[in-house]
Image (cartoon, helix red, strand yellow):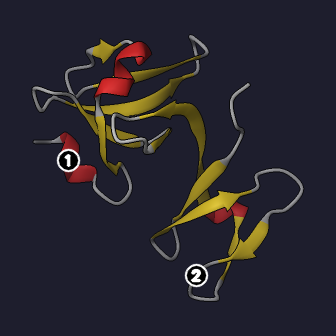
Amino acid sequence: MREIKFRAWDKINGNMLFDVSTGTIDIWSNPDGRKANSKDCKFMQFTGFHDKNGVGIYEGDIVEDTIRQKYEIKWIEEEGNLKAINKENIFRHFRDIQFMEVIGNIYENPKLLTN
């Protein structure tokens, strides 16, 4: 069984919050002491997968393969599936993720996907 955990991008303060709750607790402390409300955040779930360096992969992460092609980890609602999709909308199977490396995420490093 995979571990269920979330992180959240605080849209107001512009920082990533780790190990947050999306259910009964909707306010938690930021590292800077400011309170963040869940309506001001974008939640991302842990996929249960790790990259080639053992880094946990979340929705919204940007991964890079061995030929330096970059992919965003996305939940595809219509399919009920996670995919790694590049800027040309070409996807990689999730079994290939273990050979890739997390290099950032879409909130802190959006320009990584344009290169």
Q: Quadrant of residue 91?
A: top left
Q: Which residue in the protein does label 2 denote?
A: 31
Q: Which is nearer the eye, 114 or 48? A: 48
Amino acid type, residue under disc 1 in the picture: Leu
Task: Decide: few, some or many residues near mark 1? Use Cα within 10 Å; few <14, some 14-19, many ≥20.
Answer: some
9 or 65, nearer to the observer = 65
Q: At 29% across and 30% down in the image, what residue appears?
A: 100
- Please give left or right for residue 2 compared with residue 62 in the image: right
- Where in the figure is residue 69, as x and y percent of width and height? 15, 29
Q: How many marks?
A: 2
User: Vertically, is 73 above or below 8?
Assistant: above
Q: Point out residue 50 in the picture as x, y percentages from the top left corner.
A: 46, 35
Per the image, label 1 sits on a secondary structure element best described as helix
Of labels 2 and 1, earlier in sequence is 2
Query: Which residue corresponds to mark 1?
Result: 112
Q: Is residue 89 left or right of residue 41?
A: left
